[in-house]
Structures are given as C-alpha cells and as structure tokens.
Image (cartoon, grey):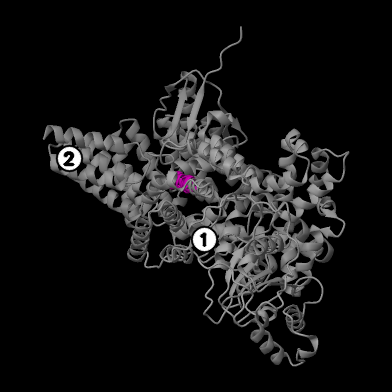
Amino acid sequence: MGTRQADIRMGVLGALQVEVDGGEVALGGPRVAKVLAALLLDAGRVVPMDRLVDVMWDDGGPTTAVRQVQDAVSGLRRALADAGVPGLVATRGGGYQLQPAPHQLDLLAFDHARREARRVAADPALTVPALRRALACWRGPALAGLTGTVLRAEAERLDALRVAVHKQCLEAELVLGRHQEVVAELAALHAEQPLDERVAELRLLALYRSGRRGEALETYREVRRRLAEELGVDPAPALQRAHQGILDADPELAAVPASAPAPPRSVPPVRSAAAPAGGPDAVVPHQLRPGLRDFTGRQVLVARLRETLADRDESGGAATVAVLAGAGGAGKTSLALHVAHQTADRFPDGQLQADLRGFGGTPADPAEVLARFLRGLGVPQQRIPDDVEERESLYQSTLAGRRVLLLLDNARDAAQVRPLLPASGGCAVLVTSRSSLPGVDGARRFSVGVLPEDEAARLFGRIVDPAAVEAEPEAVAEVLRLCAGLPLAIRIAASRLACQPGWRVATLAARLRGQDRRLDELHVEDRAVRGCFAVGYDALEPEVARAFAVLTAWSGPDFTPDSAAAMLEVPLADARRLLEALARTHLLEARGEERYSYHDLVRVYAQECARESFAAERDPAAERLAAWYAHATDHAAKLLQRERTPLCRPENGPCPGGLPGFTDRGSALAWYQDERANLTEAVLLSAQGEPTPVTWRLAFAMHIFAVQSGNWQSIRSVNLIGLASARRLGDRLGQAWMLLGLSIADIGIGDLVLAERRAREALAQAELSGDANAHTATLSHVGIIMHHQKRYEEATYWHGLAVADGRLAEKPGLHAATLNNRGYAFHALERYAEAAECYDAAVAVLQSSPEPIPYVEAAVLDSLAQIRLRLGSTAEAARAFRQAATLRAELRDFDNQAATLDRLGDLHATAGRPAAAHAAWTEALTALTGRDNPLAAVLEAKLADLGARY
C-alpha cells in the first residue's frame, strides 16, 4: 500500500502562507518567514547567501549575518519537518533551493495561467478564462505583512503584474462585448488604481457602451481633476480621445467588434481614417517590407510605440519621431516593421521605407533617399530637383497635410536622418539604429534589448518542432542561455535545428557550448551573429575599437571609467568618453550610472577581435587592473581603519591609474558593495599565470569590508587563493596576513578549532617575516579566539603579550581596542578591578591620540560603563553609557547604539528612576526603527512592563 503524499500549499500572492494537509505551518519568526519568501520568489532556483542577507537586512546586516541566515534556514527546515514535510529545502552550491510543484505554489500557478493566456491570445474567448485563473491565485497584496527593501520591491513588482493581468483580462472582456458585466469590476479596479489612465479609459468605454454616458463623462472629469491635483499633468492623449468620442457620440467608439484577433491596446481613435489627402488620384505608397509571422514578445514596447504613433499633433509643424536603438541582432527592424504594419491604417496617405545602411556598406546619401521617397509619392523623376535644398523643399511640400508613416532603418547618425523628417504633424517616423541618435531633437527613444527568458523560449518554440522542445526542456534552456536572449542568435540556432532532421536539441546545445566556435555555429546562409557585430566594430574609430577589444581582458561582471582607465592606460576623461561611445552604439551595455558590461555574445566577438589585433595588450591590461584594484581597495580600507597597515606602498609599484574619488567611510563602503563581485574576480584574475604579490595584497585589502558585512565565505575563498599565491612566492608576510584572514573567517563561520590552528600558523609566519605589524596583530587575534572559546585566562595572556609588544604605541586605535579586549576577558573572569584598569588605560590612550577614533572610543566607553556599574559607580556608568550612545548615533551604528541605551535604561530602572529608564528605552527603540533586530521586542516588553508598574 503506497504512502500518502502530503498536500502542500504555499503562497506569496497575499500574506505568506504555508499549509500542509489544510493546517497552517507555524514558521516561528520574521526571519524564517523572510527566508521562505526569498526561496519561494525564486522557486526552483538556487538562492545565494548574499541574496538572503540582502532580504533580511537593508544595510548588509551585522557581522553575524551569514550565521543568522543559516539559523533561519534551520528554523524553516524544523518547521516543515514538524509539519510532516521534511527535506523540502536543499543546500546547493553556496545557497539554498526550494522546488515546489506548480500546483503547490500560487506564484507558479499564476505564471502558468499567464503563459496559457499568451498561448491563446489570438482568441479572447480562450484568453479570458486563462486570465481569470491567474487572478484567482491572488488572496491579497503580495507578501502582506513582510518588511524589508528587497521584499517590498518584489511585492510591488508582483502587485503591478496583477494589475496588468487584470487590465488585460478586462480588455479581452470588452472585446467579447461583456461591457455591462465588467462595469462594476472596472469601478473597483479604478478605485484601487485611481491614477492608472488605461483603467480609466476602459471604464469610460464600458460605461459608454452600457448606455451610461453621463457616468462616463463624470468619471473623466474626476480623473482629470485628480491627475491635475496629484501629478500636475493632463490626461494622456488616448484618454482624451476616448472622452472626445463620448462627447461626439462616436458610433465607432460604441461599436463592439464581432470578433477580434486580440484584445485592443487602446480604444478606437475618435476620427476614422480618411481618404488620401491628395484626393482619389493621389499616389499612395506602400513600401513596407513584409513583417515576421512568428514575431514574438515585446508586448510592452509594441504598446508604447503604438501609443507614440497615435499621439500626433496634426496641426503641428513636426512629425512624431520614435527612435528604436539597440545592439546588432536585437530585432530592431523586426519590431519596427511589426508596429508599422499594425498601425498602417492610421496613415491613409501611405508608408515609406528606406535602408540607410548606417552600419554595414556605404551609408545612404539622404539626397538619394529623398529622391526615392518623392518618386514613391508620385513625383515624376524629371520634376525632382538636382539641388539638395530644393529637393528637400519639394519633399516637405509633397508631404504637407498628409498622414504618412516613414520607416528609416539602420540609421548611422542624426545628420543622415534630419533631412528625411517631415514637417507635417500628421506624419510619423520610426527610426532604427545602433545609436540612440542624441542629435535628433524631439524624438522619443526606446531601447531594444535582449528578450527575457519566457519570450526567448516562445520564439524558439515557434520555429522549432514543438514536440522537440517539450522532449528536451533542459537542452532548450541551455541553447537559450548560450544565445543570451539575442533574437538573431535564437532565430539562427532554431533555424539550423529545424533544417537538420537528424539533430536533437542537445546536439545543437553541444555545438554551441564551446566558446571558441560559438559564433561559427551561429551562422546560417547570409545571416551570422559575427557579421552583425562586425558591422558595428568596423565603424568604430581606432581608439574606440582598441578599447572594445582590450577591455575583454577583464572577466568580471562590469567595469567603470576608473577601472577602464587603468586597463587602457588613458586618463579618466578619455576612458569615460570611450565607454560612452561604445554604449551609444550598444557594443557595451550601460548598467546604472557609469557601469558597463558586455552582452555575452558581444564579449565572445570582442575576445576574437582582441586575439586578432591586440593580443599583446591583454595580459598587461589584466595585470594593471588587478594592481589598480589592490591600490583602490587599500585606499578605501584606510578610510575605514586609519591605522591599518597599507600594503600597496610606493616600493611595490605605483597605482596604474587614478584612485576612486571617495573621501569618507560611507563612500568607501558603498564602493566596496558595488565592487564586491569584481574584487573577487580580480583576485582570481591576478592568480592566473605566474604568482604575484598583488593577489594576496588585494585579498588582504578586502578584509575589513568583508568583515563589516559578514561575508565570511567571501573572505575564506579570496584568502585561500591569496595564501596559495603567497606560498608559491615563498612570501612569509603574505602567508601571515592570509592565514590571519582565514582565521577571522573561521570565527565568523563558527569553526573555532580551525581558527586557532590558522592563527598560530599565522603567528609563526609573522615572526619569520620579521614584520612587527603582522606579529602584533596576530598576537591580539589569538587573544580574541581564546575569548570566543571562553578561555579567558589565556585571552588575558595573549592580549597582554600584544600590549607588551611595544609596537602599539604608534597605533592608538589598535592599542585601545586590544586593552578593551583584555578588559573583556578580565570582566568575564570577574576580576573587575583589573578590567577597570584596562578600560581606563584604553581611555587614556584614546585621549592622547592626535585624532579621534570614534568606533573604538564608543566600544571602550560602553565597556567602561559596564564595569563602573559593576563596581557601584552608578553616576559614572550613566555618563559613560550616554557618551557611548551619542558616539554610536553619530556613526549611524544604530544596533550598538540601541544596545548601549538598553543598558542605560536598565541602570535607571534599577536605580528607581522610571522616567529616565522610559526615555532611554524609547530612544533605543527609535534607533531600531526599520531594522530587523530582536532587541526591539525586548525593549517593547520592558516599556510595557514599566507602564504597567508606574
């Protein structure tokens, strides 16, 4: 007899929900809930530790962040096991994975219903039930009740998606003539989304078609008033046209189509297409090339472009211009043709098209294109002037008062486009280019990027036999990953597979897998990805072409003008100009402010260019970049810890480029967070080939950042690489610092035995190196390990050795911190007088420092306050607590500020001062606002108890 499977139901489309056999699973706390939410949002995928830390804390978390995430995962596993479903959360390569079946998670069911709706989009009668199934998955606002920047952003994204699906469903209902049935539903959605003009437009249409014209007009007046008051804008043109149509009792607006291929993206225009402006004998050109029957995706872009083409001012003196900019192979021309054919009926005077050959071949002369367009508009050849200005004047005269759509494909620059732009406001122009054409004034610009995963899969599935796609889903996923979302690559790969009956999808995946031959495989007849990229590369200026190729020496996620300047050996201003030139032509992708990266296939091509023309420059460029990262990180670390020993000294070689422009702790920490993945890659890069001290110096420079953010695995991985490099070099100092870093990571991870062994080995290497700084730092670190192991007597010994070393005098911050640590140990041994001596000595050291060291001072004052309290000096303790709290507030160290204020409140409560205790605890609770700190609940309980007693 088989074992019954538990009925598991999980949900994020509403409050977080886990049910097993109809019973709710108790998760046991907000951190467990956040971990579960993160795993469900990425169901089936491995969620890395860094992502979970970001989910749980908005500021990178405390130094124990990784351990706390691990504890939360353990708590989740216990809760699920107690509910009878163990083993759902798996550990996978540096992260965790939860893989529910589609029927077990509302988000997967929602996505499945949406995909079904897209599949049957041609038939609204089938689309509506699928969309209704999708909407039925929702129980309320996504992730209701959960806090945190990451989860709230995900919740907002899902809620926006729900609204989009709801609008799509109601659009389809209206196509089916169900306007009366959805009037109330549209009213409710409009109340929820009062500034959504598309919802307002649909509501107007439903009311008007239901014979409720007055209500429709009143709804418009209310929308207009609200937009003006809250946003300071007028209603969008589409909404205004709907309103005008209602005022005019437009029969076309009231008409319900008997059938339609898909829900309309906007209500029908108020004014129907008229006869050609030139009269019945006018020549009406129809020059658009055929579109693609299997055109797939881009729904948002298509809708925005259609709206742009509809938003024309026919009384104005300029045509509407839309520029579609993107990389070669992104499908700009296909998209432009698709939109042009969809909107052709809005341009009864014709459609003109020209390939401007801006990239590839000789660029078309605008004068020749003008002549072609004039002939297409019915002007005889003998009437076309030879003079360019006269030709342009005739072109404008011919288009005056007409409604013509122009498609200018593959434009090189604004100078090529401007002479072809009509002065007639009834005309519109679609321009495609690898450049965003900043010199075309008044244009609306649209970026055409790669296809998202679902649209890429649908495009592949429309070309290849569906049975083959269904039979090999993993191979299909690999092919699409190797094509990296580029439509041209997907089409070529799918076409090759469709034309090779003996191939399986896995065969194609295997042929694409090898990077050296990938571009060879993405070639069919006259279409090739390599050739598409080459057209853009060949048009580059020599210095820009060099940058495009040489920057491939860097294999990290992205680069900035600073890092590019180091690689290219050029001034920062030149590096910025080169990167912007490559981004304008979409050979680089801009990722936020001044961050750039290659598309995966563009990188493969750029590497080919580097091997062919700049082979000798790649390795030196990589070495310069690794050295630059070492100098930059060393510089940033000094801002966080002024007494830190710099390892990138002048005798080690100059910095190959300018240092980043940060000047304080905040900007240095922000730089590290932005560069974290790049820094790890830089360590790996520097370790390739012959060993170099740069490897361990860079790993060492990362210590302080990684410790502050609790990235223990990151510290371990880079220090192991640095240690291997130092050992190959026989560099004792490098080995000492790397072993010390590994020991720090071992403490963070919780392996105190390994931490001690590595610390003692680091001490031995430091002694052999003769470096006083490394020796003293390691002595103090061994004392810290003893403290963690509760071997307090030994901790006092090791800290005492570090203090007695005599080398701390030049570093008051480290000196005071070591005395403070020794005081901790004496405190734990209940040797309070000796602890007080240590803390007093630490205060004296800090007072003699030539500049303030607030982080250490705050810690020492807090320790001093605790020992003063223990020894009965209540007033002194209260003053020290207050000073420590003030310093920590100034440092924005809110968690420790709250801990200090909590202790101050306890002092006042014990001393019988309830008002002072209430003030301290309230201040502590305020410091924790928006932070996931368990102390907040303790403080709330203390305040409640205080209120009950007084």
Magenta-tinted stretch: 149-163
- Tell me the kind of residue under disc 2: His
* Quarter of the C terminus within the rendering: top left
Q: Residue 375 magenta-drawn?
A: no
1 or 2: mark nearer the eye: 1
Q: Residue 870 in the image: x percent, y percent?
A: 23, 35
Q: Where's residue 447, x and y in %?
A: 61, 63
Asked which quadrant contains residue 654, the reply is bottom right
- The disc placed on residue 538 is none
Whether residue 654 is visible to the viewer of this picture, yes or no, is no
- Up/down of 606 relative to 731, above or below: below
Magenta-colored stretch includes residue 152: yes
Of helix, strand and loop, which one carries label 1? helix
Closer to the chain start, of discs 1 and 2, is 1
Q: Secondary structure at mark 2?
A: helix
In the picture of the structure, the residue carrying the numbered disc 1 is 252
**Can residue 591 be seen by looking at this rendering?**
yes
Q: CA distance from mark 1 to mark 2?
A: 78 Å
In the picture provided, is 189 more to the left or to the right than 890? right
User: Is 97 left, or right, of 793 in this rendering?
Assistant: right
Q: Nearer the viewer, residue 590 or 825?
A: 590
What amino acid is labelled 1 in the image? Glu
Q: What predominant SS class does the magenta segment belong to?
A: helix
Image quadrant where one finds the N terminus: top right
Q: Nearer the viewer, residue 339 or 713?
A: 339
Seen in the picture, residue 253 relative to 777 is either above or below; the reply is below
The residue under label 2 is 908
Residue 31 placement (x, y as % from top left): 42, 35
Counting from the top left corner in percent of width and height, residue 393 is at 66, 89
